[in-house]
Image (spheres, helix red, strand yellow):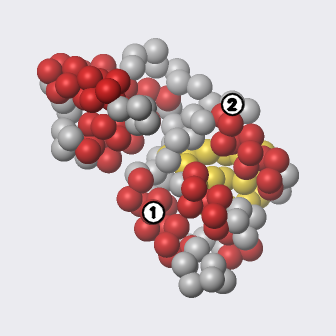
Amino acid sequence: MGQHCHDRRLIGEILVERGAITSIQLRQALAVQQGDPARPYLGEVLTNLGYVTEIDIVTALVVQCNLPYIAVTKHIIDKDVARLIPADIARRDRLIPLDRIGNILSVVMQNPLDEKMRREVELLTGCRIATFISTRSEIDQALSRLYPLSGDKF
């Protein structure tokens, strides 16, 4: 049930074609990315440089990989579903268990293409994972609402 991009264009190319950034901005961001030993995602670099917004990146990923976007902050998440993924893992990997129907767990992830993370969640929950994408800030807001820091109690 792996998720792969259907559009062979790179995210930078899509952003340039959509007019979100210029070719010069793309080259600058790629240079910053290559110079950073942590190797951040290009979308993160572009956002940090102020060239794009989070929603620009999510839109490009939707185009590139045909990923379904969900505004996770607009959903009420059942506490029993939230308990399927421990707070520390949800925060570390920036993912939100959204809903469970039978053996399928819908999960909002900042990077739904991360196969290692998907497999880890499948092993942890015993469910097949259906992934959705959201912006980092929406996921962070949902994480703080779903897993409050005061002892992580529901």
> Which residue is the extreme one toward the top?
8
Is any atom of residue 18 visible in this view? no
Q: Which mark is residue 2?
A: 2
Q: CA distance from mark 1 to mark 2?
A: 25 Å
Q: Residue at x 30, y 37 (%)?
A: 45
Could you tell me which quadrant the N terminus lies in? top right
Q: Position of residue 26 (x, y in %)?
A: 23, 24
Type of amino acid at the residue the image marks with label 2: Gly
User: In the rendered image, which quarter contains the C terminus?
Assistant: bottom right
Image position of 129 with respect to 113: above or below:
below
Dot 2 surroundings within 10 Å: few (below 14), some, or many (20 or more)? few
**Residue in the image at 27% along x and 37% along y:** 46
Please, is residue 105 above or below residue 63 in the view?
Answer: below
- Which residue is labeled 1 in the image? 140
Report which quarter residue 95 is drawn in.
bottom right
Q: Is residue 6 left or right of residue 15?
A: right
Point 62% across, 31% down: residue: 3
Q: Nearer the viewer, residue 35 or 148?
A: 35
- Of residues 105 and 121, which is closer to you in this image? 121
Tell me, yes or no, if residue 106 can be seen here.
yes
SS at badge 1: helix
How many dots with numbers?
Answer: 2
Mark 1 or 2, which is nearer the eye? 1
Q: Residues within 10 Å of mark 1 (few under 14, many from 20)?
A: some
* Residue at the spot 52% in from the left edge and 41% down from the top edge: 111
Secondary structure under the numbered disc 2 in the rendered image = loop
> At label 1, which amino acid type do we have?
Asp
